[in-house]
Image (cartoon, coloured by chain):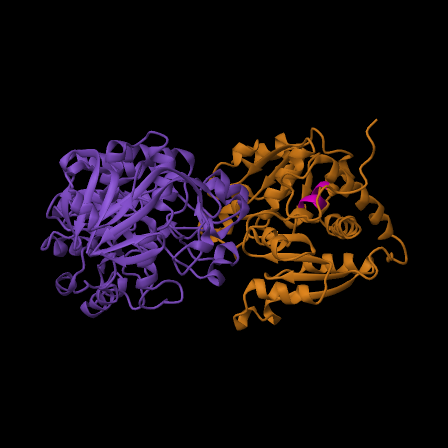
Chain colours: A orange, B purple
Amino acid sequence: MREKNISLSSRHLLGLQGVPREDIQLLLDTATTFREVLERPIKKVPTLQGKTIVNLFYENSTRTRISFELAQKRLSADTVNFSTSTSSTKKGETFKDTVRNIEAMKVDMIVVRHESAGVPLYLTKISKANIINAGDGLHEHPTQGLLDMYSIREKLGTLEGLKVCIVGDIGHSRVALSNIHGLLTMGAKVSVCGPLTMIPVGIENLGVKIYTDINKAIAENDVLNVLRIQLERNAGQSIPSTREYHNYFGVTSERIEKNNKNILILHPGPINRGVEITSEVADGPYQVILDQVTNGVAIRMAVLYLLGTMH
Amino acid sequence: MQIVLKGITLLDPQQKLNRKDDLLIVDGVINKVGNLSKDDYRHSTVYEFEDKYCTPGFFDMHVHLREPGREDEETVTTGCNAAAAGGFTGIACMPNTSPAIDSAETVRFIKEKASRHLVDVYPVGAATQERKGEALAPMCELFEAGAVGFSDDGAAIKSAGMLRFTMEYAKMFDAPIIEHCEDPSMADGAMNEGFTSTTLGLPAIPSIAEDIIVMRDIMVAEYVKGKIHIAHISTKNAIDLVRQAKKKGINITAEVTPHHFTLTDESLTGFDTNFKMSPPLRSIENREAAIQGLVDGTIDCIASDHAPHSIEEKEMEFIYAPNGILGLETTLGLAITELVAKKHLSLSQLVEKFAINPRKILNLPVPQIKEGEKANLTIFDTEIKWGVDISKFKSKSKNSPFDKTELTGKSVSVINNSKIYFEDKFVEI
């Protein structure tokens, strides 16, 4: 009998690529415990009392930052927010100097979001704190990957052998990559679906199937993780219009009812209603979109707890 | 003043010279190749160069000196010192300075700064004013002041129409247009596009961004019978295009950097900005094609694309860090390690790529190991093993991905302009 894992194998969470199955299992199981805490009248535990956490956000974020902040408060940590609009970056200070200044204030953990891939890894080299990636460029968003897996497992009982299709702008999505790595590690079969301009070069080498027919993707999968069409990023060049995208790749009730009524729909938010998904589906019986948000707090509590109490 | 280089292997493919002998240099001129008298030794400073090679001085035709404009990163003097330490007696410096090298005044400024150095400096002039691709640079004036080629390096000349004019104009003095081949509509990225960029989540530049401009340039060169040189070629398709163009008799040449025949895009997995350059490191097939191109002569020469950047500029979030790495002090070691020690190139071929071809492309006289010729020589060791140590670089910057890399082969000394550089010192001879 193998002993049950009680701690993670790394002191940082930079991505889900290469994270061992035991670690993901432990994170998901720990989140289950915290999920119960969130249902209590008093939703606070003293686990990280005395720990200082900085949320270093170089890119706009509402839900991820609030979710992290709430998770930190539920665990009784002291938290500080740093975002570009109020930072010294605009005054010409380098990223490294900013981090060194924050470090000098004695922080234990840094949650970082940045528009450049690789920044969390770089942080591990210039800071002694535990680093948690809250999204780096088009690279990874590991807590989103974990909360998606948690939500699927919660609803369907397992990840092993499940067929999961990620739909949308895969090339401009860090959510896609974290989902792919995590799900493959947990034994799921992963595919992507979208116009070929949104499918990055070589993605099939990760062991991922490619669909360009949304009906087929719905028919052949157990779970659809529908990504936001990010008009603020480059999506504008990859598709002719949101109208055409909706007509050929949108997730609609008709498509679900015609092809696979048992499908489970996830969406990391924020939703573009009427573009990648209709309101009917987004509010309908197949989806777990708001559960994902609640689970996000539990997952982030699990990550912060497991990293923050490592020795 | 006279010196003797003793017991050295003299290698000059131009005269099929390949033998171990002694060389007497008097007042900077080769006085005797062998047959030295006892008096010759007695009156000379004797350098024991047993087991070393002596060849015509090496030339790096793609160097960024950063002066004028960014003297904090490199100056003409520190760049020349780095060149001497790396085994080069001549360099061509690119025009993307600030201001750009688009006036005779700037050409003269750089030549004046380099005038007393061992290393010869030949500026490459901008092909268009301010390198903007909109109006021809005053090439006649630049050429007269000493420019040896023309380029908007850092980017390709903006339009096919403007490229055509630059090529036609430069034809009047047989100067090459040196092109940084990259289609800007596909160049908005931080690394090569492929499986690695997909897993790293970095915005990527496809190899066809280079191929398309190489093809455009070949067609323009064919049409106007112009002279085109492809800088830092990095893709298999582009190399194939140059190969076919040469067969058709088009006046085209190409260079490759040591990093493109040594490294691949997989080096970027640690997000180290010292592996970020333009063109980006490519996949393994492209690296192999670069070696093949050197072997079969499609690629004429090796050039470093020496691109100094300050530590604070390079130590930045990956997508914001500037492109470029140092090269002068590692180029020869990398070429011997990757090409000669692995038997892709003979030493004679190496000398062609390092000393003869780059000067021919720029219409510069090629030094020869012959009595009566000016001594312009590189002395190097092909066996010595050494570890790169950036703290010992003569360059003012430190942005090299090769720190701590173990290499085989190194420059020992260079001689030019009546000076010898040996054991970290310049001495008049």
Image quadrant for the N terminus of chain A?
A: top right
Which residue is nearer to you in this view: B237 or B388? Answer: B388
One can see residue B156 in this view: no
Please identify the dominant SS of the magenta region: helix
Report the residue at 25% width, 61% height from top.
B117
> Is A269 left, or right, of B9 in this rendering?
right
Residue B30 picture location, percent across and down: 15, 48
Can residue A146 be found in the magenta stretch?
Answer: yes
Check the image and report above or below for B287 versus B113: above
Can residue B362 be found in the magenta stretch?
Answer: no
> Is B211 left, or right, of B250 in this rendering?
right
| Residue at the far top in the pictured view | A1
Check the image and report above or below for B412 versus B19: below
Q: Within the image, what quadrant is residue B96 found in?
A: bottom left
Residue B335 picture location, percent across and down: 34, 39
Report the residue at 30% width, 54% height from top.
B421
Report the residue at 36% width, 62% height from top.
B74
> Is A223 left, or right, of B6 in this rendering?
right
Question: How many discs appear?
Answer: 0
Residue A104 picture location, percent across and down: 68, 66
| Residue at the far bottom in the pictured view | A91
Check the image and report above or below for A259 versus B160: above
Q: Within the image, what quadrant is residue B384 found in?
A: top left
**Residues rendered magenta in the picture:** A145-149
Residue B406 picture location, percent across and down: 46, 40
Check the image and report above or below for B397 versus A175: below
One can see residue B324 in this view: yes
